């Protein structure tokens, strides 16, 4: 009985911390969608000095490609795919870990399984971590830098594409506002 309790305690901790990590992925997605569509946040966050910081991802992808209109679409697409993959792998690993923990709980007894399911559900209440928010903001800023460079190189093509990618309109408007602010001396 004492061994069952010790194992359940370990499984309970594993469930809580694994669940808290697992739910951070969904919180990141919601945070990013909310902030990318929130003009006040974007206008406060996307500043000319942040756009001017060299981004290794943008620099490495855009070097030597000339003024190819597809270049920026390919850069954006590769960034979005890389972000998706970087989130999917850990989510799958943590999901498999949690499935293993819940399976172990089941073999201890159905009561232990229900206890761990309750722990898993309660772990969703852990607030979004600062590192999760920072990761989402960094991703938004990288997209903003791409749009800034694209707009500087070929504003009409960038604007035409933004007309089709309406979800990025608030971010693109924030980028243009930051550049206009910089052009007028920061006022």
Image: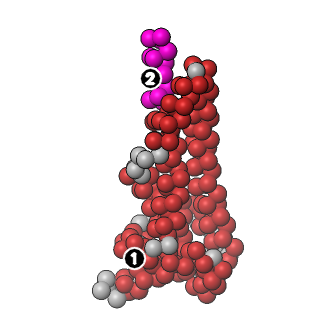
Of 107 and 139, nearer the camera is: 107
10 Å neighbourhood of mark 1: few (<14), some, or many (≥20)? Answer: few
Distance (Cα) linking label 2 and label 1: 45 Å
In this figure, which colouring scheme has been used for the structure? Answer: secondary structure
Regarding residue 56, the answer to whether it shows in the image is no
Residue with the mark numbered 2: 9
The kind of secondary structure the magenta stretch mainly shows is helix
Seen in the picture, residue 177 relative to 84 is either above or below; the reply is below
**The residue tagged with tag 1: helix, strand or loop?**
helix
**The residue tagged with tag 2: helix, strand or loop?**
helix
Residue 25 drawn at (x, y percent): 53, 50
Residue 33 drawn at (x, y percent): 52, 65
Q: Does residue 79 appear left or right of residue 2 in this picture? A: right
Residue with the mark numbered 1: 40
Residue 13 drawn at (x, y percent): 44, 29
Seen in the picture, residue 101 relative to 67 is either above or below; the reply is above
Residue 106 drawn at (x, y percent): 60, 24
Identify the magenta region.
Answer: 1-14
Residue 44, quarter of the rendered image: bottom left
């Amino acid at each position: 009985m004492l061994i069952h309790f010790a194992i359940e305690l370990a499984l309970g901790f594993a469930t809580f911390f694994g669940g808290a990590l697992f739910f951070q992925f969904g919180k990141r997605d919601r945070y990013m969608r909310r902030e990318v569509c929130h003009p006040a946040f974007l206008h406060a966050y996307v500043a000319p000095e942040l756009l001017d910081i060299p981004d290794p991802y943008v620099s490495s992808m855009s070097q030597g490609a000339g003024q190819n209109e597809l270049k920026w679409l390919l850069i954006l697409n590769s960034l979005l795919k890389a972000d998706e993959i970087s989130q999917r792998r850990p989510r799958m690993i943590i999901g498999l870990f949690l499935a293993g923990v819940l399976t172990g709980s089941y073999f201890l007894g159905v009561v232990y399984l229900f206890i761990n399911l309750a722990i898993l559900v309660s772990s969703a209440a852990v607030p979004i971590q600062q590192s999760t928010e920072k990761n989402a903001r960094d991703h938004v800023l990288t997209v903003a830098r791409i749009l800034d460079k694209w707009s500087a190189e070929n504003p009409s093509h960038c604007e035409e594409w933004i007309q089709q990618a309406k979800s990025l309109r608030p971010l693109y408007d924030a980028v243009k506002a930051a550049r206009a602010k910089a052009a007028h001396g920061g006022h």
